[in-house]
Image (cartoon, rainbow, N blue to C red):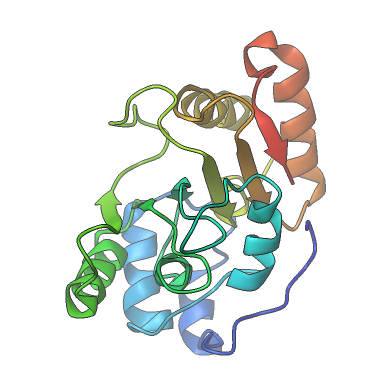
Amino acid sequence: NCNNTSKDKEEIQPSKDSQTSLGDPSGNADAGYWDKWFETVSKGTRFEWYVSTFEIAGILETFAVSGKGGYFKNLEVLHGGSGNSEMIFDFVGKPYNIKKQTALDISGVAINEMNSKLEKLQLSSDTAVEFLLQDVLLPLPFEDESYDAWIDKGLIDAMFDSFSDSNQANIGKLFNHANRILRNDSPYICITLAEEHILKLFLHTLSESAEWSTLNIIA
């Protein structure tokens, strides 16, 4: 899945002028940058990075606990760096009917947009969806082993633009948080362009610590 760039039909293309004025998003973990990105580039319209909901579902299906009412009824899924992706809403409806989803993003603009869209959906009481303003490098407010999958759709690409000491430390923090909140053998699904510095960060971080030995990374 490293280089798959197929898109949902609802996805928009970024305004070239707006994107040029903001600069390259790669390696930009600043909340202010992403607030401006969602205000001036996507402008309240759904934007999907890299792959479609259907393609993510194909990966999830390998790990899904099937039940009546849908393929993934019993799954609890965390979306790291969700932006204004509406994949979360896609998974609420048929055929997926995912039980619980939590979406995290550092941009207050994106989170406010998604919470506004969520209110309009008026979901049933047995479907839990949350959009939370959260820096994934800070301690996450969840219990140990509370999720069945972590979906990272472009998060690592956005956060890290080089192979540096600080980025090695920060990707270690990210993996530590994921390792803590994911249940045993649950996947960290990483959709990335797999640029050289990203691969080096992965290989170095995973080889340097036995702490991640139980983290099931699918990239």
Residue 44 vertical placement versus 201 (above, below): below
Q: Is 125 positioned to the left or the right of 143 in the image?
A: left
Quadrant assignment for the N terminus: bottom right
| Residue nearest the observer in this picture, 153 or 57 | 57
| Residue nearest the observer in this picture, 91 or 67 | 67
Point 39% across, 85% down: residue: 45
Point 79% across, 29% down: residue: 203
Point 46% across, 47% down: residue: 74
Residue 186 visible somewhere in the drawing: yes
Q: Is 50 positioned to the left or the right of 83 in the image?
A: right
| Residue nearest the observer in this picture, 149 or 139 | 149
Residue 175 vertical placement versus 102 (above, below): above
Residue 159 point in image, percent of width and height: 54, 47
Which residue is most to the top?
210
Residue 182 vertical placement versus 60 (above, below): above
Residue 83 point in image, percent of width and height: 41, 64
Which residue is most to the front?
68
Q: Which quadrant of the structure image shows residue 88?
A: bottom left
| Residue nearest the observer in this picture, 200 or 59 | 59
Q: Is 72 positioned to the left or the right of 45 in the image?
A: right
| Count of numbered tags | 0
Q: Is 180 positioned to the left or the right of 194 in the image?
A: left
Residue 51 point in image, percent of width and height: 66, 70
Point 38% across, 62% down: residue: 34
Residue 163 visible somewhere in the drawing: no
Residue 65 point in image, percent of width and height: 57, 45
